[in-house]
Every structure is written in structure tokens, then in C-alpha cells.
Image (spheres, rainbow, N blue to C red):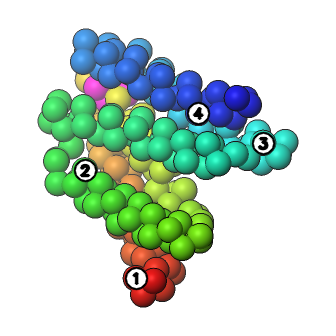
Amino acid sequence: MNLPNKLTMLRVFLVPVFIILFILGYYAAALIVFIGASVTDFFDGNIARKYNLVTNFGKIMDPLADKILVYSALCLFIEAEVIDAWTLIVILAREFIVSGMRTVAASEGRVLAAGMSGKIKTVLQMIAVCLLLLGLAVADVPAIMTAGNTVYLAALIMTVYSGCEYVYKNRDVFSM
């Protein structure tokens, strides 16, 4: 297994650590783990492209690792009443639509590339999670939670936009 794939797997293995720290109320420690896991996302992709280490495993696991990390945090935020459940439903609906389209395309030997708006969505989600975690860690500074909620709203809007863009750009998949 090459270095980028090891970094991806590290991100997956950090998820239970993050979850346990969050559940125990160690929000600052959970934030540190989340940031560390998120940073591996930046490095694994850059290393893979720079040194021509792109693998099918990485193509599948890298975005999956991102989703496991971010959506675990969002589930915990629902439990802690930090975000509303309907927002995660919107996010998951987009992911199911995109995944379904990719599956249909793959069955025809076609790969549907991720767009820039999808990457922006992921970055906004990660930033929102970090700010919301920081807001929980320093509960006496409500402006941080407000900033987190604002970025989360931007991430939600970008999620809907990127999903619509993806469906539109790949609409021919529906006629396969």
C-alpha cells in the first residue's frame, strides 16, 4: 500500500477516535483529531498526483473516507442539537444521487469525475465542522458557533448547487 492510501486509511481509523472524544465531551481533542484527519485529505491527493501514485483503491476510498469523517461529525452534531437533522438529509440525498449516477456510469465503463464545486463543498463542510467543534470547545464565545453555522449554511448551499451541477453535466447517464 502506497503512502497516499495509507494516509486515506489513517483518516478512516481516526474516525472512531474522533467519535469517542466527542461523545466523552472532549471537544478540543476531537477538534484536533478532526483537523489531523482532514489534513491527510489534502496530502494524500497531492502526493498521489505528484508522484503518479493514483490507484483505484485511492479513487474509491479517498472520497469515502472524507464522507465517513464529515458525516460522522454531522451525526454527532444532530445528537448534540448543534444542527438540524433535515440538513444532513439534504446532504445525504445529494450523495446518494451522485453515487447512483456513478454506479450506472461505471456499469457502462464510464467514470464520472468530481467537479470543483464538489471539492469546494467538502472543504466548506470540513471548515464548518471545525468551527462548530471549536464553538463547543469554547462555549463562552458564541461568535464562533455563529461563524460555524454560517459556514455550514454555505456548505449546505454548495452541496445542493454541486449536486444540481453534477446531475446536469452528467444527465446523459439517465438515458443509459
Main secondary structure found in the magenta portion: helix
Query: Are there few (<14), some (14-19), or many (20+) residues within 10 Å of tag 3?
Result: some
| Relative to 17, residue 85 above or below | below
Question: For this rendering, which residue is in front, 150 or 36?
Answer: 36
Please tell me which of labels 4 and 1 falls first in the chain: 4
Residue 13 at x, y percent in the picture: 48, 22
Which mark is drawn over residue 84? Answer: none
Q: Which residue is mark 3?
A: 53
User: Going from the N terminus, do you reach mark 2 or mark 3 first?
Assistant: 3
The span shown in magenta is 134-138
Whether residue 46 sits left or right of residue 72 in the image: it is right
Q: Residues within 10 Å of mark 1 (few under 14, many from 20)?
A: few
Which circle, 4 or 1, is nearer the viewer?
Answer: 1
The amino acid beneath tag 1 is: Phe
Which residue in the protein does label 4 denote? 8
Q: What amino acid type should be assigned to the residue bearing mark 3?
A: Leu
Label 2: which residue? 88
Disc 1 marks which residue?
174
